[in-house]
Image (tube, helix red, strand yellow):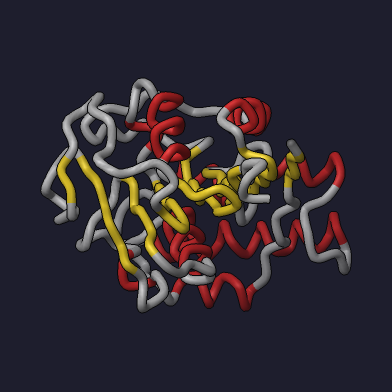
Amino acid sequence: MSFTLLDPPLPSFAQFRHLRNYGGKLTMLRRMEIDLISQLELSGEVLDFGGGETTNYRRHLPSGLTLRSVNISDEFNPTDLVAIGDPIPFEDAQFDAVITFNTLEHIYDDQGSLADITRVLKPGCALHIIVPWMYPVHGHPDDFNRHTPSWWAATLAGLGCEEVSLLPLVFGRRTSALQIKGRGDKLVRGIVESWAAAFDILEARARFGNARIYSGRRGQTVWSSAPGWYIKATKATTATDA
């Protein structure tokens, strides 16, 4: 199994303006997530584990998908309701892709859920995961897990994934700190966030020059405190499928 820890892009004023277009009420992490989701290449039959029709990212998914969704609650209008701890009601190797966004941290037995959603994924197809890392506890109804890149690599390898990559979702240290401590009063939230983003951009230029990514040990000091991770894992093909 190959595991790649991807260096995140350096921030810029153009990127900040682009992310702000997703809405001032969202955190920087949520904006980065939606921006990433809008660029996913998905087709065919897709399972949205922990989602539904009324999630804030649904309209950013590609059109033309055959989308099934499972959730323990009807709050987000999923296609299938599943009780906590029950297996998802789909056949082995049914889906062309599985997406799960901001869900696995709320599941105590997240390895069991990962095994179940990997089971229904076709060999050679991809699992797309977004989870928080340095992000406040947010029960919905509970919040159980935060895992390191090493945990994701070892766990997904054990579930039969042959290629795994992890991208830290981070703009900079000051915007990350702002999300950890809360963005403050609504009246000054936009101003505080803009100042934090500006300092992140200027610091990145000073420390990394004309580079385009947070790289090396200096980069690690930034992305190791990222608010979230995006993990992509490709399920291994079987001998008969190869």
- The residue shown at (33%, 43%) is 91
In the picture as drawn, the residue positioned furthest to the front comes out as 240
Tell whether 59 sits left or right of 127: left
Tell whether 6 sits left or right of 152: right
Establish if 23 lies above or below 235: below
Establish if 151 lies above or below 41: above
Question: Picture quarter containing residue 60?
Answer: bottom left
- The residue shown at (49%, 50%) is 122
In the picture as drawn, the residue positioned furthest to the left comes out as 74
Tell whether 211 sits left or right of 76: right
Image location of residue 54, percent across then percent down: 20, 62
- The residue shown at (18%, 48%) is 80
Q: Number of callouts in the render?
A: 0
The reply to whether residue 173 is visible in this rendering is no
- The residue shown at (19%, 53%) is 78
Residue placed most toward the observer, 115 or 223: 115
Residue placed most toward the observer, 77 or 19: 77
The reply to whether residue 235 is visible in this rendering is yes
Image location of residue 52, percent across then percent down: 23, 56
Tell whether 95 sits left or right of 127: left
Which quadrant of the figure contains the N terminus? Answer: top right
Question: Picture quarter containing residue 71?
Answer: top left
Image location of residue 117, percent across then percent down: 41, 39
Image location of residue 84, percent across then percent down: 21, 27
Residue placed most toward the observer, 194 or 40: 40
